[in-house]
């Protein structure tokens, strides 16, 4: 893929030289026995970054979310989430298949839930016909809405409803650092609005593998057991944790460059007659838009110019900026898309 400008996802990012060196030199041990110093260090760093008591290294964002839902709920529970939440659309139905939960979907506004809608969606505990509502899942940034950012106030409003009704809140924070950069806050200010949070190491942060789930000590102890059930207890997992440490130390601030590149590209795309893009959704490193003449031909025409983009549907395209896409790559892309129209 070296010669392509690859906008399909920030998951395509490769580890840095420093990460590869960290893997080579990582002190290792058996993490199932809690004896891997690199995993322990990453987990401590992650917990501190999220302002939580404890953290757990997991294989992927999907694993982190699934383990969180399974740890917060009981069989048959209902989990409230936004209608286009990644947990609902893109995690293979795991919360139903494995956690035995039902999603209760609420359409959001650019990914944000209206607290009144959340209130209405909570089941009446006294009615034996109803499922039990036990959890609300939020997503920040919100992938399906175009990488949009949910504000602290919007999250706080949902948290207040959750607290009133004795519900827990989990955050799919796969891209929480993008949200933090966009809001100009520390990630822990976002995480303070939820009981648990998953964030990904292997997206914009450029690690080859991994995500981290954070929460209270008690919750993480439960989550560790669920991770074991799912076969996710790994032995010398320090080889995964070591680049994660480098990522937390060095890769967060540069996400601002990805946001600036996405903005530059989006401002050019919005001018094109064949493209239908709501610029107000371009808040971080993701651009979602419609191509009036059809998405498939758009994908092919760009691929012929060595540019890869993700086709979301018959008409929709997603482009994601990341560390391997420079400002010059974006300027080249703008020339190419302008030539198409
Ligand atoms: N998203 C991937 C694909 O699944 C679409 C991507 O390319 O964006 N939460 C959110 C918000 C995500 O965007 C993703 C991955 C996940 C969770 C799952 O993470 P992984 O892929 O590590 O399981």
Image (cartoon, rainbow, N blue to C red):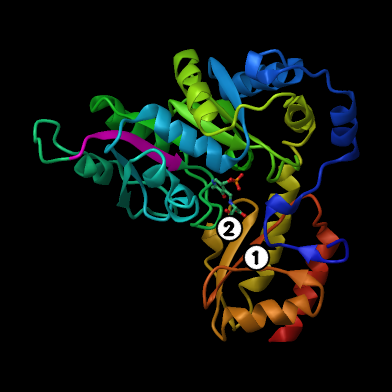
**Considering only vertical position in the picture, is 329 above or below 242?**
below
Give the percent coordinates (x, y) of residue 84. Answer: 42, 55
Quarter that holds the N terminus: bottom right
Give the percent coordinates (x, y) of residue 46. Answer: 64, 24
Q: Is the residue marked 1 within 8 Å of ligand 1, measured from its CB?
A: no
Q: Circle 1 is placed at which residue position?
A: 266
Q: Nearer the viewer, residue 211 or 172?
A: 211
Residue, x 40% and y 39% (percent of image)? Answer: 137
Residue 313 falls left or right of residue 74 = right
Residue 57 falls left or right of residue 172 = right
Q: Are marks 1 and 2 in contact (CB under 8 Å)?
A: yes
Q: Kindly state the secondary structure of the residue where label 2 is placed.
A: loop
How many numbered markers are drawn?
2
> How far apart in space, not on screen, are marks 1 and 2 (Cα)?
7 Å
Q: Circle 2 is placed at which residue position?
A: 282
Residue, x 83% and y 70% (percent of image)? Answer: 332
């Amino acid at each position: 893929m070296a010669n392509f400008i690859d906008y399909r996802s920030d998951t395509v990012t490769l580890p840095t030289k420093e990460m590869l060196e960290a893997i080579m030199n990582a002190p290792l041990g058996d993490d199932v026995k809690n004896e891997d110093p690199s995993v322990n260090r990453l987990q401590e760093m992650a917990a501190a970054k999220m302002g939580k008591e404890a953290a757990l290294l997991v294989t992927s964002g999907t694993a982190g979310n699934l383990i969180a839902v399974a740890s917060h709920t009981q069989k048959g529970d209902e989990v409230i989430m936004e209608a286009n939440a990644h947990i609902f659309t893109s995690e293979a139905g795991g919360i139903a298949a494995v956690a035995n939960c039902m999603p209760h979907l609420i359409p959001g506004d650019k990914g944000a839930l209206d607290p009144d809608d959340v209130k209405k969606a909570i089941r009446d505990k006294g009615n034996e016909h109803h499922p039990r509502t036990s959890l609300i899942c939020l997503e920040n940034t919100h992938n399906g809405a175009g990488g949009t950012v949910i504000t602290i106030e919007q999250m706080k409003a949902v948290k207040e409803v959750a607290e009133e009704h004795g519900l827990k809140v989990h955050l799919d924070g796969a891209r929480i650092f993008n949200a933090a950069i966009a809001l100009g806050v520390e990630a822990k200010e976002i995480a303070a609005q939820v009981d648990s949070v998953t964030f990904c190491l292997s997206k914009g942060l450029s690690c080859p593998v991994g995500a981290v789930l954070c929460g209270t000590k008690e919750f993480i102890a439960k989550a560790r057991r669920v991770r074991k059930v799912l076969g996710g207890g790994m032995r010398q997992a320090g080889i995964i944790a070591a680049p994660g440490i480098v990522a937390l130390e060095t890769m967060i601030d540069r996400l601002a460059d990805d946001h600036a590149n996405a903005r530059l590209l989006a401002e050019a795309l919005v001018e094109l007659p064949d493209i239908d893009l709501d610029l107000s959704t371009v808040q971080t490193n993701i651009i979602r838009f419609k191509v009036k003449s059809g998405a498939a031909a758009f994908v092919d025409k760009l691929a012929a110019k060595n540019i890869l983009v993700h086709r979301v549907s018959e008409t929709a395209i997603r482009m994601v900026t990341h560390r391997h896409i420079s400002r010059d790559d974006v300027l080249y892309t703008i020339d190419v898309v302008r030539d198409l129209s």
